[in-house]
Image (tube, rainbow, N blue to C red):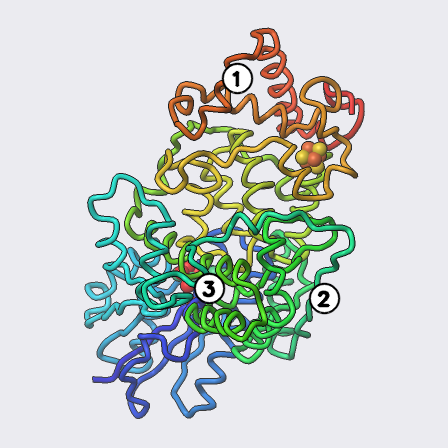
Amino acid sequence: MSALRLILGDQLTRDISALDGLDASQDTILFVEAHDETVYAPHHKQKIAFILSAMRHFADALRAEGLRVDYVKLDDAGNTGSFTGETARALARHACTRVVVTEPGEWRVLDMMRGWSEAFGVPVEIRDDDRFFCSRGRFARWAEGRKSYRMEFFYREMRRETGLLMESDDPVGGQWNFDHDNRKALPAGVKPPPRARFAPDEITRDVMALVAARFANHFGDLDTFGWAVTREGALEALNYFIDACLPLYGDYQDAMKQGEPFLFHAAISPYLNCGLLTPREICVAAERAFRKGAAPLNAVEGFIRQILGWREYVRGIYWLRMPDYAHSNALEAHRPLPWCYWSGETHMNCVAQVVKETRVNAYAHHIQRLMVTGTFGLIAGIEPREVEEWYLAVYADAYEWVELPNTHGMALFADGGLLASKPYAASGAYIDRMSDYCGSCAYDVRKKTGPGACPFNLLYWRFMIVNEERLSKNPRMAMTYRTLAKMEPARRATILHEADAFLDALASGDEAHGPGQTSLDL
Ligand code: DLZ
Ligand code: SF4
């Protein structure tokens, strides 16, 4: 019984379950560069180049072990452009009698695979993806019977189960969470460490040429490509993070600084999410740094929580709730995504900086994603589906299982509070506190209304006003709604009027054209 073992672009892990029990004398390992996968979202050029180059390198590493690999390139004659079409063709080519695959990360692809056995007339075995700490079944057991799913409780169970940062039954340091230490703005004298670019080798250069020719109209710069594309490179990036960045990662986790896209962040999520690194080895490396005194607990706990807690949790929610999860729109947000998300052309300096860095790097760090482009999407009432497609497209680490709960649930509150206990709405004051963006902005962060008022200020209160019925009963919103209750009706009307004028100017493109073009007289 020779098996065709299909490996997807985010399954580039040597001990992926699809390869368990491989019979090197009979089996064929299949990789498919599929047109459909490159365009189901309008991916950033670097994201496509990264995934295709990492696939080609990984396939070469398997060949070097003496394994039989069939690799279908994007431009190969006869490539049908889909996983289904190419698996069918490969089955015929190799006369395999069964297909083995690890469950895909996206519901869309799993749905596709469910029809394969019947379509191909051979058994198709879809194996669990055991690279996660928490299986889908384990998460479903945790979630059963709960009214709301709070990450913190899930995280504690994961800490106990894995023993990470535990002292027998207790959390190291006597607390589960040290987030209160992790909210510092970056002081003027603190310089983040430089980042190494991994110079593209011949394989990557080939892929970049392919991407440049074929996806010329996709978002993003390509010539700044500097991602590692092999396991060795990914490990180097991990070790660099642990040594050079982790010690201050916690302190400045929420900080933003113009011209510093990485700060003390790891920027290893593209490697982790495509399989070049595993969550376990990352957490173990971070814990080791703490145990030997090389990094403080607030940094290490905060970092491990992102991977052991949050990442596992959003995956659990995704599989628990899909496919319906994507369809809710609890705040009935229907404005189209403003063009500035793609062009970066806006007088809002915070948004312009984040979009620009996203274009250059196919990366933005967590707080930029959540509190700038995410919060703006929330308070401007942008249609969740459009914001989600943007996040899925522009970040090199984005696959729907991780992108959707983060955007739909966490940033946009479109699930009505399944993930977050309240919307992450914030005015310009938050951005001003955590960044240096406001200092060089055409808007004035201290102004709440009137000419040049910060749009985050206007939109924040507009958001509270238009969602009053939905949100005012939320106990975590009580203070905000007490403030709103004291607001004069005339002031409410001014906010609504100016915020709507701003949104109209943004939609028409006038906001980007500069002073004199908008009603705000910048
Ligand atoms: C994102 C992506 C892209 C751009 N291209 C490919 C590809 O050509 N071949 C492939 O196997 N995977 C690709 N991927 C990743 C898949 O979209 C990903 O495996 C599925 O979405 C499941 O998570
Ligand atoms: Fe952003 Fe407002 Fe600050 Fe400008 S003033 S950078 S729009 S928060």
Q: According to the image, label 3 marks what residue? A: 273
The image quarter containing residue 11 is bottom left
Looking at the rendered structure, which numbered label has been put on residue 484? 1
Farthest residue to the front: give it: 174
Residue 95 in picture, x, y percent from top left: 27, 82
Q: Quadrant of the C terminus?
A: top right
Tag 1, which secondary structure? helix
Tag 2, which secondary structure? loop
Q: Ligand 2 falls in which quarter? A: top right
Q: Nearer the viewer, mark 1 or mark 2?
A: 1
Q: Which amino acid is tagged 1?
A: Leu
Q: Residue at x 41, y 92 (%)?
A: 66
Looking at the rendered structure, which numbered label has been put on residue 197? none
Q: Which amino acid is tagged 2?
A: Pro
In three-dimensional space, the C-alpha distance between marks 2 and 3, rounded to whole angstroms, equals: 23 Å
Residue 479 in picture, x, y percent from top left: 49, 24
Q: Nearer the viewer, residue 125 or 409?
A: 409
Looking at the rendered structure, which numbered label has been put on residue 194? 2
Left or right: 255 as drawn, with respect to 171: right
Q: Nearer the viewer, residue 336 or 192?
A: 192
Q: Which amino acid is tagged 3?
A: Asn
Say which label, 2 or 3, has the lower sequence index: 2
Say which label, 1 or 3, has the lower sequence index: 3
